[in-house]
Image: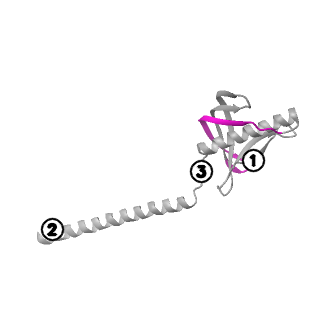
Amino acid sequence: MGNFLLLKSRNYLKLFSLLKMRRFYLLLVAILCLVVSGCGVKLLIPDMVLVKQAIALQITLDQKQVDRQLFGSETLPKFKLQRVTISAIEPMVIQNLQSYQIRGSYDFTLKLSQREWQQQQNPFEVYLQRQQRGETWRLARPQIGEGNNEIIWRTYLIE
């Protein structure tokens, strides 16, 4: 009976030490993951800050084009985006790179010289393209090609 209890207690000690080692390795792996990801965070999907920057860039590009056509120059009034909400994110591929089509709405305030002009719940649709290294994102804008059948993507760095 004494030998049986001794063997049983040794087995429990082995099991206990294995569990302690497993916890140690799990903790070590978790710490390494935090350290490695903290050194070079790469967003796999767009976050809200990036989406806001993309919307602002798209508005700026549209405003520049309208100003050029109407006035022959580019004047950029100040604007503010608020309450950006995302209703859909769909993965896709643009120019052989991982991209996302993002739809939603935002509130827009345009600051004019004498007053402010506001619009609420403006719908938006932006295409965001993650670059090969995953360090930068680009706003992708579809344009109709020469044959009117193909889509040509123009991309703009989001800074």
Amino acid type, mark 2: Leu
Circles 3 and 1 in contact, beta carbons < 8 Å: no
Label 1: element kind: strand
Circles 3 and 2 in contact, beta carbons < 8 Å: no
Q: How far apart in space, not on screen, are marks 2 and 1 (Cα)? A: 73 Å
- Extreme residue toward the front, this view: 114
Left or right: 88 with respect to 69? left
Q: Which residues are magenta?
A: 74-98
**In-front residue for pair 147/99:** 99
- The residue wearing badge 2 is 5
- The residue wearing badge 3 is 44
Q: Position of residue 141 (x, y in %)?
A: 75, 41
Colouring of the image: one colour
Amino acid type, mark 1: Tyr
Magenta residues: mostly which secondary structure?
Answer: strand
Q: Position of residue 132 (x, y in %)?
A: 68, 56
- The residue wearing badge 1 is 156
Amino acid type, mark 3: Leu
| Mark in front: 3 vs 2 | 3
Q: How far apart in space, not on screen, are marks 3 and 1 (Cα)? A: 19 Å
Q: Residues within 10 Å of mark 1 (few under 14, many from 20)?
A: some
Q: Earlier in the sequence, mark 2 or mark 1?
A: 2
| Mark in front: 3 vs 1 | 1
Label 3: element kind: loop
Say if the magenta span includes residue 99.
no
